[in-house]
Amino acid sequence: MELAKGEQSPTLPPELERHIFEICAFSRPATIPKLVLVAHRVKQWLEPTLYRALVVGEPQPFHSPDGEPWPVLTRSTLSSTIRRKSTEFVRNSVRNIFFEQFCGPFLVQILTVCPEVENLYLRWQAVDLNLSGFRLPGLKKLSIRDPVVLTPTPAYSHITHLHMSSNPGSESDTDVFYASILQCLPSLTHLSLSHYGYRRILLPLLQNCPLLEVLVYFTCERDFTESLADDVRFVVYGDPDSYHRFNDWWRGVCSGDDHWYYAERLIEKRRSGEVESRLLFM
């Protein structure tokens, strides 16, 4: 339908227009680089969202769970991108970082300008990692491979969710890790462990972590002691080979629909009697 002479095109209230664009951005994050080209106001609304989640590693294809490609920033690309933006913009925008590969000094450099990060995944890490100089008051979720990084520091004091995916090593190393959980993570409510080497400390963790609400154990095992099976907080991810680290992390970033979510749902059903109380497997 053509507009009459002198009649203006219909416009939406700015708040509604922004809400519509934000829905598009959150539902299909890979489209954000194109959406910010629509208009200057749209760029102002959505550009922080583009930097809300950073994937850092080698230049290889990453895809979100819905199949959309997601850009991977190399170290040099990320460094140059941050230099182009104001310190305030970076600090207020970046909330989630997935490091495919990194070294300690580079991570320190990034966290220096991204102190409000809330969700940090360190897939391959170096032994020179040291976060003792950081507070990171917003850091709630941490996924790491090497328990050696768990040292007393304010950076860990607010962490509620920890995922460990590496071999803890010897029994003495496992004991050190167990002690570090109790000592370094006073706010921990959710813990997931992806190696059979942690089995011997599952029950002590449930008994001695006062705030622990969810303990997820990735394993194909089926036999557990009554003490474990009777604890409603203990959940087993029974098909660890199907677990995809990046997809799980990405779903958590975009919708909260990660393995923690499904574990919480199962625990709620067990508590309410909707399912049998000893149904451990999610």
Image (cartoon, rainbow, N blue to C red):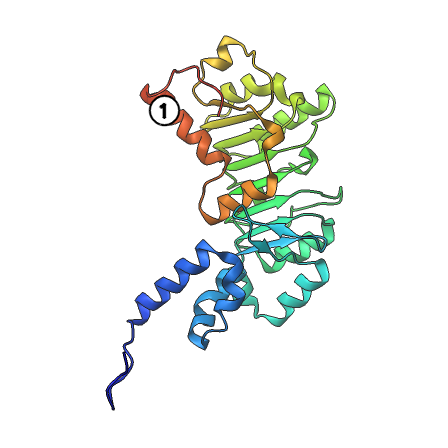
Q: Which of the two residues, 120 or 64, is positioned nearer the viewer here?
A: 64
Give the residue furthest to the top.
226
Residue 63 location, x and y as percent? Answer: 59, 50
Quadrant of the drawing holding the N terminus: bottom left
Quarter of the rendering containing residue 22: bottom left
Q: Which of the two residues, 33 or 261, is positioned nearer the viewer here?
A: 33
The answer to whether residue 228 is above or below residue 56 is above
Residue at 60% across, 60% down:
113
Residue 92 visible from this viewpoint = no
Q: Which residue is mark 1?
A: 269
Quick check: 9 left or right of 207? left
Quick check: 21 left or right of 224? left
The answer to whether residue 42 is above or below residue 131 is below
Label 1 crowd (10 A; few <14 / some 14-19 / many >=20): some
Residue 5 location, x and y as percent? Answer: 25, 90
Give the residue furthest to the front.
1
Residue at 76% across, 41% down:
127
The answer to whether residue 17 is above or below residue 213 is below
Mark 1 lies on a secondary structure that is: helix
Residue 231 visible from this viewpoint = yes
Residue at 44% across, 54% down:
27
Residue 174 location, x and y as percent? Answer: 67, 23
Q: Which of the two residues, 271 or 248, is positioned nearer the viewer here?
A: 248
Residue 170 location, x and y as percent? Answer: 74, 22
Residue at 70% across, 58% down:
74
